[in-house]
Image (tube, rainbow, N blue to C red):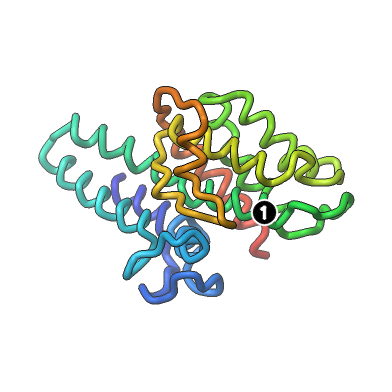
Amino acid sequence: MWDRAGAYFVGSIEAGNDDNGDERSGGLLLFNLGKQLCSEFNTCSNEFAKTNDEIISLFRTGQGALNGNQCNILEDTIGQIESLMNVPLLQGLIRSADRSDGVQAKSRSNEDIAEGFMFATALLPIIDRADPEAASLISQNMVQPFKTSTKPMPSGKLEVYHMIARIIPKIGVSCENIGIYDGYNFCEGAASQSSSALLTSTLFSTLFVFTLFQIMFSF
């Protein structure tokens, strides 16, 4: 079962370790999404995305805890993995907000609007549990326009950035893992927003929605 969790994260068609930022290489799951986006957020490592490195390390920690019947360590490790798996989804949401900003109405076929819908749909259940106001604003800007073919991002990308910065600490994600995009420092943004207790994400529902849309848009 632990190996299966790792397989759902990495996939079976990953390429080498020197292809960060190359959207044509690798698989279709969260591991490759992190590689695609890290160069745009200045979060790449020497091998993969920094977040990917952390998750792989935690999978090894979890395997050791599982073999040693260390249930408390295993539970804590699972929580850390779940939170880190939200990072590439949040980065994808941010990039889609930027690219969709200013796009005209009735552009449903626009790839960036479709990707924004995908990322928002995957994250909104998690965000809504932590901050319903932020979830509502993101939905108004990135979900409803796709469904109704109306103008996307009516509030503007900066307002969406602010809301994402606000919810980052609430869902157990470090702003350093998100990085800097479009000149916006999400650590500074998070510091200017009110924060509350951390919320553990729902791993399998997020992976299911993300994988489903990746498969849909890959054909």
| Closer-to-camera residue (168/215) | 168
> How far across and how far down the image is residue 210, in percent?
56, 48
Between 184 and 46, which is closer to the camera in this rendering?
184
Find residue 69 and report its horizontal and vertical position in percent. Answer: 13, 35
Residue 148 picture location, percent across and down: 85, 41
Residue reaching furthest left? 68
Describe the element under mark 1 as helix, strand or loop.
helix
- Residue type at mark 1? Asp
Q: On the picture, is 65 further left or further right than 1? A: left
Alpha-carbon neighbours of circle 1 within 10 Å: few (<14), some, or many (≥20)?
Answer: many
Residue at image point 46% right, 26% down: 195
Relative to 143, does residue 179 appear above or below in the rendering?
A: below
* Residue at figure coordinates x 70%, y 35% from the top left: 139
Q: Quadrant of the C terminus?
A: bottom right
Look at 14% across and 43% down and name the residue there. 67
Tally of numbered tags: 1
Task: Please state which of residues 189 and 98 is positioned toward the viewer in this rendering.
Answer: 189
Q: Position of residue 140 (x, y in %)?
A: 74, 35
Q: Is residue 97 left or right of residue 171?
A: right
In the depicted structure, whether residue 69 falls above or below residue 63: above
Considering the image in quadrants, where does the N terminus appear? Answer: top left
Q: Which residue is mark 1?
A: 98
Q: Is residue 193 left or right of residue 139?
A: left
In the image: residue 63, left or right of residue 53: left
Q: Residue, x 55% and y 74% (percent of image)?
A: 24
Q: Which residue reaches farthest right? A: 106
